[in-house]
Image: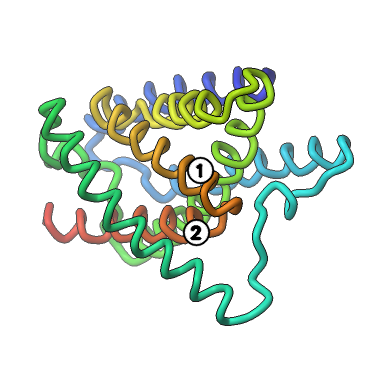
Amino acid sequence: MFLLLVIVGWSALGYIGAARMRVATNPHRASMYALTIVWEWIVVGYIAWGVKRHGSSLSQLIGGRWDSAKAFLNDAGFAAGFWIIALVILLFTATAIHAPKPSAGMRYLLPQNGLEIFLWILTSLTAGICEEIIFRGYFQKQFHAWTGNVIAGVLLSAVVFGAGHIYQSVKSAVIIGVYGVLFGILAEFRKSLQPGMITHAWHDGFAGLVGRLLLK
């Protein structure tokens, strides 16, 4: 419960900060990326400490194991197929809720120079690893334990995941929440967070770099 309250508070601060950055002449993106990286690893560190106190480990929370090239390629294949299916579902979701297309209003979030591109890639890798541990590894399992229902665990963790991205806009948060449901299903199906980590990191990195080119 404590971590949930912390995530809610962080999301509220992110919403306020994003509103300021949208109207800033020269938003400090590099600082934002660096702060995000540090924050997410701190949360994962807290989770690792918590699960260790209860006799488990972070590796058990993540599940799966890349003990060979074949194991990695198998997860990468699932990640690629999942990403394609997810994009179709997200497109239908965006259309159904009449979400606006990406516009200059998102420019403040996207990297604009070499340093920012480098930090964006690091942020994407961090998000892929850390957010899957936080939302699909920790919250999904916690909600499952609290409710005794796998579906409730997936849905509730997706709600928290979407709310955590409210700074991007309400409709974007809804779309990201749907993505959270899909990530939750993938984690339950594979009994591992690793395919989701691959997809999440790739999607964030790809979206940011392509978005930068489209908005130029």
Badge 2: how crowded within 10 Å, few (<14), some, or many (20+)? many
Dots 2, 1 in contact, CB < 8 A: no
Q: Position of residue 131 (x, y in %)?
A: 53, 43
Looking at the image, is mark 2 or mark 1 earlier in the sequence? 1
Q: Mark 2 points at which residue?
A: 195
Rendering quarter of residue 214: bottom left
Q: Residue 36 carries which label?
A: 1
Residue under the image location 58 percent in, 74 percent down:
71
Query: Is 153 left, or right, of 146 in this rendering?
Result: left
**x and y percent of residue 18 in the render?**
33, 30
Q: Residue 71 carries which label?
A: none
Q: Is residue 198 left or right of residue 210?
A: right
Placement of 11 over or under 80, stated as above or below: above
How far is mark 2 from mark 1, CA to CA?
A: 22 Å
The quadrant of the rendering that contains the C terminus is bottom left
How crowded pointer 1 is (Cα within 10 Å; few <14, some 14-19, many 20+) is rated as some
The amino acid sitting under disc 1 is Thr
Position of residue 164 measured from the top left corner of the image (x, y, whole percent)? 44, 29
